[in-house]
Amino acid sequence: MILDQIVHASTIRAEALPSGYNTGFADSRGVTQIGRERYSLLKAITGSGDKNAIIAEMKPASPSRGHLRAITDPVAVSQDLIGGGCCALSVITEPAFFHGSIATIPAIRNQTKIPILRKDFIVDKKQIEETINARADAILLITAVLGDQLGEFVDAARKAGLEPLVEVHDRQEVRTALDTGADLIGINNRNLKTLKTDLSTTIRLAPMIKRADRTVIAESGVTWPCDIRTLRSYANGYLIGSSIMAAENPRRRLEGFVYA
C-alpha cells in the first residue's frame, strides 16, 4: 500500500534528523524570541472576507498524478501564487513520492507575509523541530498516520509555536481529531489507501466538525471553481495543489478558485 511506503520513507528520514534544535519560540500566537513574526493560518482562513480562503500548494509531483510542475525558482512560484490571491501557502516537503523539499520553506520565507503550512507525513517529533527551524507557521498532522499519538503531536506542535492542521478521512478520525482540541481540521477527500477522491467526503464529515465549532478545510479533489461552489456551505477553506500546479497558468487557475 502506497501510504505504508510513504510512512516508511518518512520514518527513515526522521531517524536521520538530529535532536535538540534551538528553536527559540515563544508560543503559537506570538513572536519568536529571535524576533520573527508568525502568521496565523486560522486567522488567514477566517479573515478572508469575500474571497474564498485558498491554501495554494507548491507541489512538484504526487503518487496519483506523477509530475506536475518543476519548481526550480520557489520564490517566483510562491510570489505568483500570492499574487493570485491565496490566503496561505502549503509546501510539500516529502521528497521521495512528491519531489518536495524542506529547503523550499526557508527559501521563500523572507518574501512571504502570509502563513506557510508544512505538508508532509509527520511521524517523529523531531520533524516538528525541523519545521520550526525551517520557519513555517503551521504543520499538517495526519490522523491515519499518527493514530493514538495524534494528541501528543498536536500538543507538541502547539508548544513549539506551530498551528496544527489535523487531517481526517472518516467519522472515527473526526472524533479522534476533535478530542485533541485542534482548531483546524482538514478533510481529505482522497482515500490514502486507494488514492481515489470523492468530494462527498467533505459533505459527510463537515457537519460533525462544525457542530464542535472548529474550522473545516477541504483537501484534495478540488479541480474546478464549481467544486468550490459545491463545498462552500461545508468548508471554511480549501487546500488545492494538483489542479493549480498542473495548469498552464497557475496564477490564473488559482484566481478562478479564489473568486468562484
Image (spheres, rainbow, N blue to C red):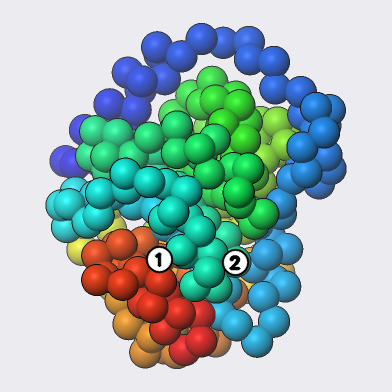
Task: Indicate the quadrant where residue 23 lies.
Answer: top right
- Nearer to the camera, 51 or 191: 51
Ranked by sequence position, the earlier of labels 1 and 2 is 2
Q: Residue at x 67, y 40 (%)?
A: 162
According to the picture, the residue beneath numbered tag 2 turns out to be 87
Q: Which residue is drawn at 74% across and 45% down?
A: 38
User: Residue 217 in the image: x percent, y percent?
Assistant: 53, 66
Give how far apart the Cα atoms at labels 1 and 2 are. 12 Å
Q: Tell me: residue 8, above or below residue 161.
A: above
Let me know if residue 243 appears in the view.
yes
- Nearer to the camera, 187 or 38: 38
Task: Indicate the quadrant where residue 93 lies.
Answer: top left
User: Residue 46 in the image: x percent, y percent?
Assistant: 70, 71
User: Residue 192 in the image: x percent, y percent?
Assistant: 28, 52
Q: Quadrant of the N terminus?
A: top left
Q: Residue at x 61, y 51 (%)?
A: 112
- Residue 94 is left or right of residue 132, and the answer is left
Q: Is mark 2 on a helix, strand or loop?
A: loop
Amino acid carrying mark 1 in the image: Ile
Q: Is mark 1 on a helix, strand or loop?
A: strand
Task: Indicate the quadrant where residue 151 lies.
Answer: top right
Let me know if residue 150 appears in the view.
no
Amino acid carrying mark 2 in the image: Cys
What is the crowding at mark 1: few (fewer than 14 residues within 10 Å), some, or many (at least 20)? many
Q: Tell me: residue 51, above or below residue 27.
A: below
Kindly indicate whether the residue at mark 2 contacts the one at mark 1 (C-beta within 8 angstroms): no
According to the picture, the residue beneath numbered tag 1 turns out to be 240
Q: Tell me: residue 233, above or below residue 16.
A: below
- Nearer to the camera, 194 or 227: 227
User: Residue 132 in the image: x percent, y percent?
Assistant: 62, 31
